[in-house]
Amino acid sequence: MELKVIGKGVPKYDAWGKARGEVIYADDFSMPGMLYGKVFRSSLPRAKILSIDTSKAENLPGVHAVITHKDVPKNNLRARFGQGTEIGAQFEGLYRVLAEGEVRYYGEPVALIAAETPEIAEKACELIEVQYEPLPGVFDPLEAMQPGAPQVGEKENNIASHFKIRKGDVEKGFAQADVIVEGFYQVGYQDHAYLELESGVAWVDDDGTIVIRVSSQVIEHFREVAEVLDLPHSRVRYIGTLIGGGFGGKEDITVESYLALLAWKTRRPVKLTYTRKESLLVHSKRHPYYMYYKTGATKDGKITAVHAKLISDAGSYAALSPWVLLYSTVDAIGPYNVENVKVDAYTVMTNTPITSAFRGFGAPQVNLAYESQMNELAKKLGMNPMELRRKNYLKQGDSLATGYVYDRPVPLDLLAQKAWEALGPKRTSSKPQVKIGRGLAVGMCSYGRLTFLHDTSRSYVRLELDGSALIRCGVPDVGGGQGHILAQIVSEELGVPLNLIKIHVTDSQLTPLAGTTTATRQLYMSGNATLKACRELRQRMFRKAAQMLLTNEEDLEVGEGKVYLKSDPTRYIALVPLINRMSADGDELYVEAQFNAPFSDVPAKEIIEGRTFPDFTFGAYGVEVEVDEETGKVELKRVVAAFDVGRALNPILVEGQIEGGAVQGAGYALMEDMVIKDGIIQTPSLQEYLIPTSMDVPDVESILIESGTGLGPYGAKGIGEPPIVGIAPAILNAIDDAVGVRITSLPVTSEKILMELKASKEGNKAA
Amino acid sequence: MKNLEMVTIIVNDRPVTAPVEAHESLLDFLRNKAGAVEVKCGCNQGDCGTCTVLFQGKAAKSCLILALQAQGKEVRTIKGFSGDFLMEQLQESFVRNGAIQCGFCTPGMLISSYAFLQATPQPAREEIRNAISGNLCRCTGYKKIIDAVEEVALKRTGKQQDKQTTPSSFSEGQEEAKGNYLLLGGG
């Protein structure tokens, strides 16, 4: 079937409103009588709370409410992250709204204020008096694992979760190896640094429903917020705004519980927007990891065994740390076919800010390690790194580390070659101290949620009498075209021109619940739900059209506002008379459809086996860097990304994900340095925590391979998260190629390069 | 009591008069007093560029200007370019090239690009890259933004004599706009 709208890089529906400044983001919205919320936060990373005195703050004129844990109906929830059924303790976490008894991290919310102006709310914060008894904290996961370490959370030890992979026999595998490489790798925090700060407005509707208009990737959090207030779920409604950047940072609840509590108590609308400093200090971040890897191979380059030990910093509350760790565990050896694998992964609580979801969700960290190992192994074998990878790529029918047999094509060899060839002939440096190097790295990243979470999505499509169409789908739109692409699907399937399609996104009581905009799942899940709704509607259209055109349904096709005969396109019926006939005959002009992902059982033990994800997206990066041996400065000069996207339903949007992911990954690799000391972040501004500007990165070149083998509509794979996987190790491999030093921690700084260069020169002298 | 002073600022050709405190920024004034919520706040300290407006014809970060400093001055936000050919070209090019994802940086990015193209009608690609470096974008990786600006620049140089339908009220400022960015304080 020839596709008419799918595959076209048409502008997304929200682009014009954004270009004209007409989109009302969360903080842009106000209501009559609105108060301003503020969060009062702990000034110590770990302490016993002896007393909280809010009386002075309450007596300040203009203050309408001060709330502490005592005022929260349910201050402590066993968070199962949207799961109504049992998922096992290792996947649960404590969601605590306001500190009680003890503060666990610097900046933990202790009290909430609603006041008539932001200045009064700020002033009220200064009047809250908390007496603390400082307690020794633990700020590093390795220390937190030691016996006798301060206990961070509610569990007896600080290990929040431990997962294992046991495939084959690694002892035997290493015995078969001719060469073995080992390495320690370390990565720090990464902040999402979306430009729109966490924000929302809440009010109590005239029927007593709490309405929260908020920038959130998960409107299903209405359930948790209702539980916090001890209200029926139906009494809390989320209206999701278009989101000014998410990247996983608006996946957990941000301001919503606070807003709901303040609005409920004051019976006034309340707005709460974090400051940039507040956001950088306390909102969730990408997990720091310590990683040990050992990889063995025969002399002809066949990997015989991989042993990995992963330790991540779960921060002071578990949040999504166990889930992120599970992703890392499953992805630990990357897209390679290895018979003997042993992985031990731990996520460990510390008195530091919460770590949770961030684009890639545990995949970028291990990717850095396994792709560094591949190049080290190639070096030791005297083999071309691309050749070594080629000998070990996962192929259709091979088993993953979990033993699950991957039944789809894995075109990694093609992707790596494409990315590498696009770099072209190597340049020579014009300055003797500046060395040019190139690096390759591949990667895998799942799309769709963990299969044991039994993920579902719903979408509603309706035809209008004038031939236009309406979509309602609760898909939070972070700007990647999550909403728009559904309109392209409807246009393709029903022949309705794009400009006649209206889409409503994210109202938890009015749009069918479509699940989270996380896990690279919306195109896959909500795209399939929308496709399913369209196919049902189309069948009804064809049934009617067949009667009207005196033909059979099989001979019908839809496009350009009409239904026509495949065998004779001059015989057709336009959509408007067709729809009106259907309406007059009482045919239903709407469908709400649900799509279910493949389901599996909850892992019953620490060992992770079998199917864990619906599918994976594979990609390869080729990069070129310049390294200045005198200053240690690394400049990223070229980036080529090749991804099997299954099918590019809108190539411009797909490229946008790749270019943006590559640059975010380049920032992770080279710039983004979140310094933390004794649990307190030292870089709480965008002049201290630097993210890439246009001057820090080259134009990313994207190569889209369309295997057509994805599980999404028309064979598409997910592409939201995958592009952040691969670029960091490609850069490390390029630095090694340029100056012969192996950097093993992120971010790469000039100091690290100079130290390694010095060490390598001294090493050469000694030898 | 608060020390309030009345100021009048010309926002998109309309004078807006409101009481302000000494510490209030132009950004505060625009969002809270002039209803111009299309001017975004991403950091409030001059690091991100989302609050960029045309101030006296030059691109400026409105969080770094005090409202009192703007007394009697002309400010143009992204909503103040109706009928302006260059801005409409830029908007159309941003939309078509996929230069807009979440859109939060877009108003500031468009205004920086606009001021730059006015001062530098025939830029090299690397000059465009430099011109937008004060505006952070976390979604796009910048390539499509630079593509969008470059495309407009190339179109313009193809027919340089085209009359711009720029509102006259800030044409004076344009002639002075040599640099692409008016630097005020840090950032």
Image (cartoon, rainbow, N blue to C red):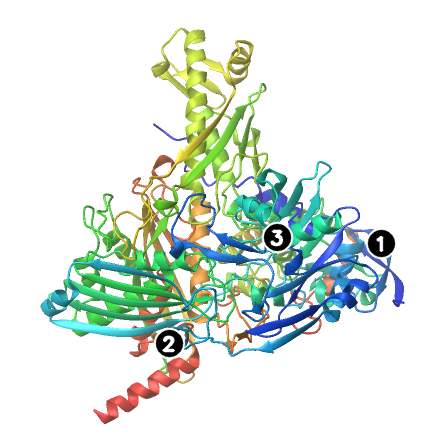
| Same chain shared by disc 2 and disc 3 | yes
Q: Is residue A419 left or right of residue A106?
A: left
Q: Nearer the viewer, residue A88 or A365?
A: A88
Residue B21 position by quadrant:
bottom right
Q: Dot 2 falls on which chain?
A: A
Amino acid identity at mark 3: Ser
Of the two numbered discs 2 and 3 in the rendering, the one whose residue sits closer to the viewer? 2
The crowding category of the residue bearing disc 1, from other C-alpha atoms within 10 Å (few below 14, some 14 to 19, many at least 20), is some
Q: Please give the residue where the numbered disc 2 appears in the rendered image.
A: A146
First-in-chain label (2 vs 3): 2
Q: Please give the residue where the numbered disc 3 appears in the rendered image.
A: A257
Compared to A126, does A215 lie above or below? above
User: What x and y, as percent, mark residue B64?
Assistant: 71, 68
Q: CA distance from mark 3 to mark 1?
A: 37 Å
Q: Please give the residue where the numbered disc 1 appears in the rendered image.
A: B16
Looking at the rendered structure, the secondary structure element under dot 2 is loop
Q: Quadrant of the N terminus of chain A?
A: top left
Residue sitting farthest toward the top: A550
Compared to A112, does A634 lie above or below? below
Q: Dot 1 falls on which chain?
A: B
Can residue B76 be seen from the camera position used here? no
